[in-house]
Image (spheres, rainbow, N blue to C red):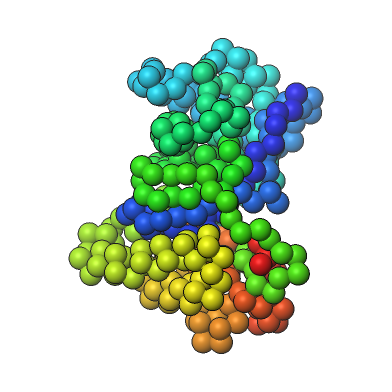
Amino acid sequence: MKGPLFYSKILLFGEYGIIKDSKGLSIPYNFYNGALKVDENPSEEAVKSNASLKRFVSYLKDLQTEQPELVTFNLEALKADVERGMYFDSSIPQGYGVGSSGALVAAIYDKYAHNKITVLENLTREKLLQLKAIFSQMESFFHGKSSGLDPLNSYLSLPILINSKDNIEPTGIPSQSAQGKGAVFLIDSGIVGETAPMVNIFMENLKEEGFRKMLKSQFIKYTDACVENFLHGDMKSLFANTKKLSKVVLNNFKPMIPEQFHQVWQKGIDTNDYYLKLCGSGGGGYILGFTQDLEKAKQSLKDYKLEVVYQF
């Protein structure tokens, strides 16, 4: 048995901001993917994944008992498959901000949900919000509190524009150009990031008025501008605003940036060779980079392996 593939995602803009209603832009990242599988001779990884799925099944059972109007599943089939050793076979790194649990949630919903909303039907705003609400509850099993956006992105495999908490829409993004000098790339920090503690730090900071002010007047302002610039292909403004955003993050989100990257981050701002930002909740995993000149950025960051996500 092998199910369809579900892909990883990258939130280009909006990490943390979307908690406070900033805009956001999330794109599928097809380099990594995962699928539900049953093997004759499961590996150690597969056995671990299967054990986690067993816990997830009882969580979903409680969820549908508590909120039958939200979602119900064919639990008999799901249970039987998990008993047979089903696991999530995934190349998506965990704790890297590219949506490993999101792809798993999408795969389970796709295979076992009753009356599921499909990608093929007319995706009205209501349907998108309903999917997001379902995914948010399902993914909370892994994260404590989930927006539901990662599974949504993985399930639809479309770029998603977040205008606010209750206004999301599929969107088109400017087409890539393989010859383009500009690029969005990932750097591997070499550390696994934990989502929950980082979100907790953010929530604690929100209790301070100064932090809330900075969030509104700087962080959200530049995030919204970056989303608009990117969607309209206004690259000149995009880089000006990404630089401002990179500075704000370095000054106000230090705990989310692995210490050995503080100087690398500052160097990008000083030289304009590249600008870094958080990918997901930070604390490790990937760091997202933007550059107007990929060769220059590679030179400048020659100690790191750059994975290009998008070229323009």
Q: Residue furthest top?
A: 76
Q: Residue furthest right?
A: 40
Residue visible at 33% across and 70% down in the picture: 218
The front one of 81 and 215 is 215
Residue 120 in the image, given as x and y percentages of width and height:
60, 29
Residue 282 in the image, given as x and y percentages of width and height:
48, 60
Along the horizontal axis of the image, is 230 left or right of 7? left
Q: Is residue 2 above or below residue 90?
A: above
Residue visible at 52% across and 44% down in the picture: 170
Q: Residue furthest left?
A: 209
User: Which of the 4 image quarters holds residue 104?
Assistant: top right
Q: Is residue 127 above or below residue 166?
A: above
Residue 106 in the image, given as x and y percentages of width and height:
57, 34
Q: Total of numbered circles in the picture?
A: 0
The front one of 4 and 240 is 240
Q: Quadrant of the C terminus?
A: bottom right
Q: Quadrant of the N terminus?
A: top right
Residue 78 in the image, given as x and y percentages of width and height:
59, 19
Whether residue 33 is visible, yes or no, is yes
Residue visible at 43% across and 44% down in the picture: 168
The front one of 123 and 81 is 123
Along the horizontal axis of the image, is 256 left or right of 177? left
Q: Is residue 44 above or below residue 217?
A: above
